[in-house]
Amino acid sequence: MKLLLYSHFFAPSIGGVETIVMSLARGLAELRAENGAREFAVTLVTQTPRENFDDAGLPFAVIRQTNFWKLRKLVRDADVVHVAGPALAPLVLGFIARKPVVIEHHGFQVICPTGQLLIESRQEPCPGHFMAGRHSECWKCDPALGWFSARKLWLFTFVRRFLSKRAAANIVPTSWLGGQLMLPRMSTIHHGLVQIEPLKKGDAKLLSGTANIVFLGRLVTTKGAPVLLEAAKILSRQELDFALVFIGDGPERANLEAVAKQPPLLGRVQFTGRLSQAELETKLQHASMVVVPSLGGEVFGLVVAENMQRGLPVVASDLGAFVEVLGEAGKTFAVGDAGELARCIANLMKSPEEMTSLEAQAAQRAQEQFGLKAMIAAHASAYREAERRETT
């Protein structure tokens, strides 16, 4: 089967979509039929520049920054078109060419103009203004967009939703997201994780010493890092012994560092910037827990699942996707509530037994629910079904 996989973002860009698309394309390209032949001839199309990335080392073809006419030809030559997120150009071309189109939703672009389901001006989860018909709320969600851009994104949301309803299949990484999008021919396929060995913990101390609390992710407004800093201030006033480590980089780093340099956090907070995979694993050897305080925009939570796989206790905001991924193997707190987050962290710091229990539960759940082979097999099945439906 000739599979065209379109992802606007791809390596060397770093993010959740890029990670999943890479794992999926690699796994499908290496999938063998019963006669030993490759089942899928995968061509990945992206608008991300190559820079110093080695495309030749991948088991599938990569075509970057193609123009409309080349994309049109690639779509016409494919048996099935997979679009990572409802990008308009490949969707329209796929339908014109009467190809089976499979959309994997990595955001909220079919129910929210900004794709984040977050009220940008207040940094609060959106209650669903677009789907409820409260369109003036969408226009003023993010004042930085301006009059024209806000309405353009709003109009594009109608188009994306119209096209998604006509896709051969809509794939979501969590059932919670499916309940939000409400599209036909929808199936849930959990993201699969590249194998990470459970950590051999170093000095991740609790009552006997310093608790090492880790934030791992991009330093952008939607990730909620200021909520964690506010919780840390509360823990400081309670005279609990902890260190806070921010792993990652982004436009909010300078603001966060300025807060961390003030009492009562002075000397307690470290910013490492972006780390290599080896450096990251070494740093996490000393982690007591990982905190994921996102405010919105999350449809799965790779950072949650990956650290569960490492056997680290995870404390996350109670966004629907996080609740589904964690199950009973972690702790959640109300979105944006620094006081409740501080209580969750303090309770874990005071209960080594619960920490140990969560470590085991998290690793087991990640292994059972988020297998890479299962993700690849489920996608392959979806493509076969989409092609079969198109030819009958």
Image (cartoon, rainbow, N blue to C red):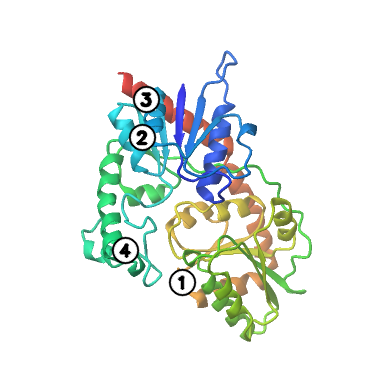
Q: CA distance from mark 2 to mark 1?
A: 35 Å
Secondary structure under tag 4 reads loop
Q: CA distance from mark 3 to mark 1?
A: 47 Å
Secondary structure under tag 1 reads loop
Q: Is residue 114 left or right of residue 59?
A: left
- Of 213 and 356, nearer the camera is 213
| Disc 3 + disc 2, Cβ < 8 Å | no
Q: Which residue is mark 4?
A: 127
Tell me the residue at 45%/65% (across/down): 295
Binning the other alpha carbons within 10 Å of mark 2 as few (below 14), some (14 to 19) or many (20 upward) gives many
Q: CA distance from mark 1 to mark 4?
A: 15 Å
Q: Position of residue 223 (x, y in %)?
A: 50, 64
Q: Position of residue 305 (x, y in %)?
A: 57, 51
Query: Visible in this render: residue 61?
Result: yes
Foreground mark, 3 or 2?
3
Residue 76's label in the rendered image is 3
Measured along the vertical axis of the image, is residue 106 above or below residue 230? above
Q: Which residue is mark 2?
A: 169
